[in-house]
């Protein structure tokens, strides 16, 4: 289950090749990557199944919860359709134990209208990321990598900094809110116990360093410049100096 994290597709060809060799099914988690591409294919369309979330903060979000599965496999489509509606195969005939996971009509109506703006909003996200890329000049910051194989839709713009918590506090003092995606590796959570018994070194390190900067289509250019300026002024120990 590759995750197209932060809005950029995972390198799918090698994954699909491994899956093919071992006769495995691949499910794309495209919940952060609506509209992203990988070698001219769209996120969610490359594997056996693609999953999207329409949670309000996603690149395509409703005004409440919602989601979508896409697949070319008729059997999988039928099964998913049945599972979202208590496992019904026809009215009040249940062949599976399903759940209630229907997309309600109000959300569908909102999403249908917003879908037309998805590419425009994604382009604006790209523009904002580009402004961050060009205007953040600090040797304390590692900017997100952009792969050549596709288009990034910047659900999030995630930098890395060895002094992440201090930087976050410093930005907060400057009136700039940031978030951390994500503070702990999934396997460190009680619910994820056993997922990776020996831990993953890169994951451990990144979970301590990642910081998501403000990014949404309606943010103004001046606001982005202000974030960049604050970041460029940040030095290790900046907070303590201000207190003195
Ligand atoms: C938001 C998100 C989900 C979950 O979406 P729900 O709508 O809450 O089910 C899953 N994976 C990723 C990568 C996400 O960003």
Image (cartoon, helix red, strand yellow):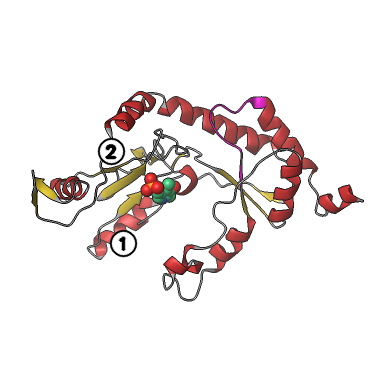
Rendered view: 125 above or below 231: above
- Of residues 22 and 59, the one nearer the viewer is 59
Q: Is residue 8 left or right of residue 115?
A: right
Task: Give coordinates of residue 119: x percent, y percent.
Answer: 42, 28
Kindly identify which residue carries mark 1.
18
Task: Give coordinates of residue 217: x percent, y percent.
Answer: 53, 29
- Crowd rating for badge 1 (residues with CA inside 10 Å; few <14, some 14–19, many 20+): few
Q: Is residue 235 left or right of residue 154?
A: right
Q: Are marks 1 and 2 in contact (CB under 8 Å)?
A: no
Q: Residue furthest right?
A: 244
Indicate the quadrant where residue 174 lies. top right
Whether 107 is among the magenta residues is no
Q: Is residue 130 visible?
A: yes
Magenta stretch, residue numbers: 212-221
Kindly identify which residue carries mark 2.
103
Q: Is mark 1 within 8 Å of ligand 1?
A: no
Residue at x 64%, y 36% (from the top left corner): 132
Task: Give coordinates of residue 189: x percent, y percent.
Answer: 49, 66
Q: Which mark is residue 1?
A: none
Q: Main secondary structure of the magenta part?
A: loop
Residue at x 59%, y 51% (from the top left corner): 180
Instruction: Tell me the SS state at disc 1.
Output: helix
Q: Is residue 30 visible?
A: no
Task: Give coordinates of residue 155: x percent, y percent.
Answer: 49, 40
Residue at x 61%, y 38% (from the top left corner): 214
Q: Residue furthest bottom?
A: 198
The quarter of the picture where the N terminus appears is bottom left
- Of residues 89 and 138, the one nearer the viewer is 89
Instruction: Tell me the SS state at disc 2.
Output: loop
């Amino acid at each position: 289950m590759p995750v197209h994290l932060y809005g950029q597709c995972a390198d799918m060809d090698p994954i699909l090749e491994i899956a093919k060799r071992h006769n495995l099914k691949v499910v794309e988690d495209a919940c952060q990557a609506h509209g992203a591409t990988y070698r001219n294919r769209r996120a969610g369309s490359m594997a056996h199944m693609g999953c999207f979330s329409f949670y309000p903060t996603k690149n395509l979000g409703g005004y409440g919860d919602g989601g979508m599965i896409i697949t070319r496999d008729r059997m999988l489509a039928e099964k998913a359709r049945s599972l979202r509606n208590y496992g019904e195969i026809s009215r009040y005939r249940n062949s599976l134990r399903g759940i209630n996971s229907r997309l309600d009509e109000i959300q569908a109506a909102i999403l249908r209208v917003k879908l037309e703006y998805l590419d425009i909003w994604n382009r604006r996200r790209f523009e904002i990321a580009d402004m961050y890329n060009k205007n953040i000049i600090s040797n304390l910051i590692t900017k997100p990598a952009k792969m050549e194989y596709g288009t990034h839709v910047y659900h999030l713009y995630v930098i890395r900094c060895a002094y992440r918590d201090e930087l976050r506090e410093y930005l907060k003092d400057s009136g700039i809110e940031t978030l951390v995606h994500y503070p702990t590796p999934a396997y460190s959570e009680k619910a994820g116990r056993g997922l990776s018994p020996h831990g993953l070194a890169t994951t451990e390190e990144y979970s301590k360093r990642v910081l998501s900067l403000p990014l949404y289509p309606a943010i103004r250019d001046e606001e982005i410049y202000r974030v960049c300026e604050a970041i460029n002024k940040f030095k290790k120990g900046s907070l303590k100096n201000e207190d003195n």
